[in-house]
Image (tube, rainbow, N blue to C red):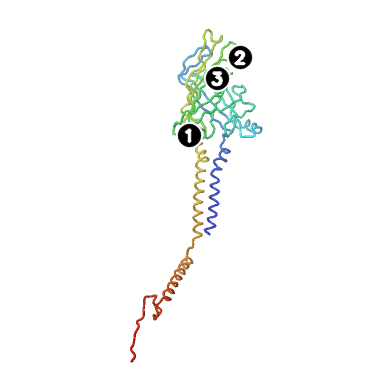
Amino acid sequence: MRRKAGLVLLALAVFFAALSPLLRWYAFPRLAKVPANQYQDMVLEAKDATLLDYGTMRAKKVPKVTIVQTLKGNVEASERIEESAGRDVVVWDGLSYVVGPDGKMVSKIPERYIFDAHTQEPVHATGEMVDGDPVRRTGIEFKWPFLTEKRAYEYFDAQARVTAPITYEGTRNFRGLEVYYFEQTIPWTKVKIPKSLPVEGLTPEAVAETGTTRWYTTVRKFWVEPLTGAPVYGEEIHREELRGGALLGDRDKVTAFAGHVKMREDYIAHTVDLVKSQRLLILLMTSYLPWGFLTLGVLLLALALYLEARSRRPSGPAARGGRETVVGQRLSRALVCRVGSAPAGSSGHGCFGYRPRSSARTPR
């Protein structure tokens, strides 16, 4: 019975020991993915900012500029692209909507970001665009890969339509989470004028005819939770200028926007709570379950070997009887030896140290 139980435990030990690496290196890369129907929004603010008044074409200080960013998963588009791409694809329709202190729109820039659901690598397909202009992205945007590494990544800048390194600058603690801090600098770059402007009838083509151009620079900062690859906080030191042309009169340039853009506090708390819950699922797949299964396999193997050893060891009355037989045989051999060597004239009980008294009687 013990031997059968040992074999069953041995089979279970092999099963759990094999399941441990399979879960981590085979199942996790295939199961961990961004859902195609995900929706998220974020509100950022730049307080004490500088903003261009398009009515006077003069820059002025304002108490606050608000940027609302939304990302909506387009399930229908992702399913259509998956048929030709042959892999899991996510399509995010994004919108960056800038609002002035009076609540009026300053600019809005839509974009479509198409990427691999597992690796976050860009997938090139019809419809990939920024502000209606087709683009071909390289590098990540919005989200880092699962199990983010301590290294530089290529990051796509939607304003400049360029990809530049975003470098790892160290590990930090943010609201109780260990995060990786990344930073990217985009130098002054000539960029396109948004197609939606706050002045009715003013179009990018009309601005271009005046010879005025738009320039942009930013320092982009992200605090990224490494297991999920999700940013929990972000900032930008953002500057835009209009330069040259008849639109500015005798001025060489004017600030269109300048401000230190930060996530609003209520969205920080919501994002941290969301990432903490998602982080637990990643830990289960990459650490808790694989190590737990491996430990369980080792324990089961030790128990199986113990039962096997017990099954080979004699026990019970039969074993005791066997020991008694051996002792009896040894004692018998000893007695025979002593009797055979008794002195002549003895009664043969010399083995007990008894020698009979001899009597010499004188014949009469």
Q: Nearer the viewer, residue 166 or 89?
A: 166
- Estimate the spatial distance between the alpha carbons at disc 3 and disc 1, rounded to whole Å: 31 Å
Q: Which residue is mark 2?
A: 205
Q: Quadrant of the C terminus?
A: bottom left
**Label 3 sits on what residue type?**
Ser
Q: Is 206 displayed left or right of 332 in the figure?
A: right
**Label 1 sits on what residue type?**
Asp
Residue placed farthest to the bottom in the image?
364
- Residue 107: give its label: 3
The mark that comes first in sequence, 3 or 1, is 3
- Estimate the spatial distance between the alpha carbons at disc 2 and disc 1, rounded to whole Å: 45 Å
Q: Residue 340, percent across and down? A: 43, 76
Considering only vertical position in the picture, is 326 above or below 233? below
Q: Is 193 displayed left or right of 352 in the figure?
A: right
Considering only vertical position in the picture, is 186 above or below 91? above
**Label 2 sits on what residue type?**
Glu
> Would you say the residues marked 3 and 2 are in contact, meaning their CB atoms lie under 8 Å apart?
no
Considering only vertical position in the picture, is 17 above or below 89? below
Residue at disc 2, secondary structure: helix
Q: Which residue is mark 1?
A: 273
User: Quadrant location of residue 207?
Assistant: top right
Q: Residue 302, percent across and down? A: 49, 52
- Estimate the spatial distance between the alpha carbons at disc 3 and disc 2, rounded to whole Å: 16 Å
Q: Is 331 displayed left or right of 5 in the figure?
A: left
